[in-house]
Amino acid sequence: MLQAQPSTLTKSQNATLRNLTIVGYLEGTSFLLLLGIAMPLKYMLDMPEAVRYIGMAHGVLFIAYILMLVITASKIKMPLWAMPAGVLGSFLPFGPFVFDYLLKKRLKKSD
């Protein structure tokens, strides 16, 4: 996890950004588990239970990620591209990880 935070953000803003990072990593990991483990178990070994449970967890984490993205955008002055990129990233494997890296890099650069 990238820990370098821009020094111009307040403690509250840093906490919000940290929460977005945590939820994003959880959401991204659940998506990778769904694609890489649960779906092959369902279609190759006829075990649909994994998709049911991991899919439900991923759905909850997806909603939490989008909500955290909106909350973060309202508390931190994010670049204009950040909101659509965050939403798009949530639909792509490894997307939340790349988005988190790019957002923190951009926020640090604008410091």
Image (tube, grey):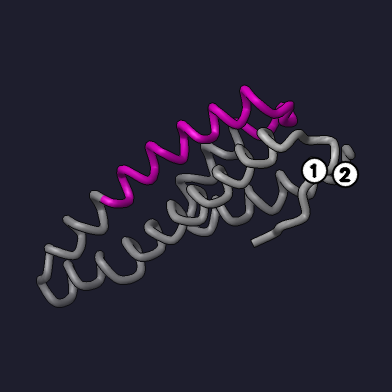
Asked whether 51 or 22 is in front, the reply is: 22
Residue 83, quarter of picture = top right
Q: Which residue is mark 1?
A: 106
Q: Residue furthest top?
A: 74
Q: Is residue 62 left or right of residue 42?
A: right
The answer to the question of whether label 2 and label 1 lie on touching residues, with beta carbons closer than 8 A, is: yes
Q: Secondary structure at mark 1?
A: helix
Residue, x 10% and y 71% (percent of image)? Answer: 46
Q: Which mark is residue 109?
A: 2
Q: Which mark is residue 15?
A: none
Which amino acid, by three-letter code, is at mark 1? Arg
- Magenta stretch, main secondary structure class: helix
| Spot occupied by residue 17 in the image (x, y as percentages of width and height) | 63, 41
| Spot occupied by residue 3 in the image (x, y as percentages of width and height) | 71, 57
Q: Is residue 91 magenta?
A: no
Asked whether 30 or 22 is in front, the reply is: 22
Q: Secondary structure at mark 2?
A: helix
Q: Is residue 79 magenta?
A: yes
Residue, x 12% and y 63% (percent of image)? Answer: 49
The magenta segment:
57-83
| Spot occupied by residue 107 in the image (x, y as percentages of width and height) | 79, 41
| Spot occupied by residue 93 in the image (x, y as percentages of width and height) | 48, 57
